[in-house]
Image (cartoon, rainbow, N blue to C red):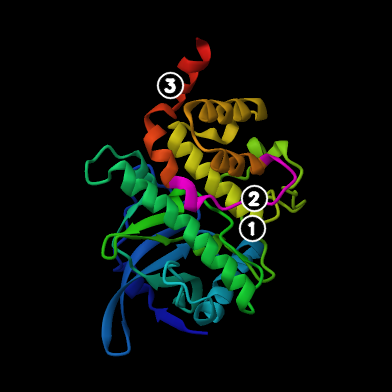
Amino acid sequence: MQIINLTKRQFDKLKPIELSKGIFNNEADMYYFYGKKGWEKREYVLKKLHHDEGEVFGNKLYTINALIDKKDEINMEELVMPEALGVVSQEIVGSIMPYIPNINLSIILLSSDSKYPLEQKIAYLQEIGLILEKMRKVREYTSVKDFYLNDVHEGNFILNTKTNHINVVDLDSVKIGNNIPFASYYLGPFGLHTYSSKYQETGTDHFIGGFYKTNQNTDIYCYIMIILSFLYKYDVINMTADEFYDYLEYMSDLGISKEIIDIFATILINKDNINPYEYLEEIIPYYSKLNRKEFVRARSK
């Protein structure tokens, strides 16, 4: 286990990272940190957790340690993995990971900037699906079996401005090994998922863990919520089942293929969810009609 020690004086000199407007992190404070990897000087992030004791903190440390231990076996460059524990004045305060120059995906999806055309936004959404598919293969072909992103939402993905590809951040919220997965934005106590019995409640203290057991179905469900929220231009999380099926019928009326509509529909039926990333380009010609305003207008006629 790698540990990077800082004195209180060194820590006080670190520059805080200011998150973009609309991006929140209620669990930690972030700081720029310069260190060395071999002879190379690199820029890192120190993520200082707000909880520094108790069961929540212990669970976070277990998750961070598991990610560090399994990093080489997981071997996914898309995941911004912790590389060491951060220690200040002999107390563990959080984790240290590489700094990635970035723009948060949630900002890009809402942007009207011409440098992010619809086709590019769809490509970024497809990359999320590819990441989930790579993780499925990690579970299948390595010893890292119980490994899921868990808290799949727009704010936990960034565009790496050096590579122009999507990376995943805030990995201390993942499900790995025997940890207790943390709360997931799209899997709260209320929402569309509550209309299906395949999402099973954890029965744990929700201050410590999430409301629902994490698996491939929950990861893909949350991914589909990201896609539908982008298309609908409104958070679909609180749709009723009737509203959801009405929206899918509207998609069908527009001419969208049965294949992708059926994939979306699986999130509420007793069947394993299907990763839709290969079909997302089909939506592009219909995009302008898929927002909430157009949907309500069409249904009011």
Q: Which residue is mark 2?
A: 273
Spatial CA span between label 1 and label 3? 32 Å
Q: Please, what secondary structure does the residue beneath circle 2 have?
A: loop
Q: Is residue 58 visible?
A: yes
Query: Dots 2 and 1: beta carbons under 8 Å?
Result: yes
Q: Please, what secondary structure does the residue beneath circle 3 have?
A: helix
* Amino acid type, callout 2: Asn
Chain part drawn in magenta = 268-280
Q: Which residue is mark 1?
A: 216
Secondary structure predominantly adopted by residues drawn in magenta: loop
Q: Is residue 61 visible?
A: no
Q: Residue at x 26, y 85 (%)?
A: 40
* Amino acid type, callout 3: Glu
Counting residues from the N terminus, which is met first, the one under dot 2 or under dot 3? 2
Q: Which residue is mark 3?
A: 294
Q: Residue at x 34, y 61 (%)?
A: 165
Q: Residue at x 65, y 43 (%)?
A: 267
Q: Please, what secondary structure does the residue beneath circle 1 have?
A: helix
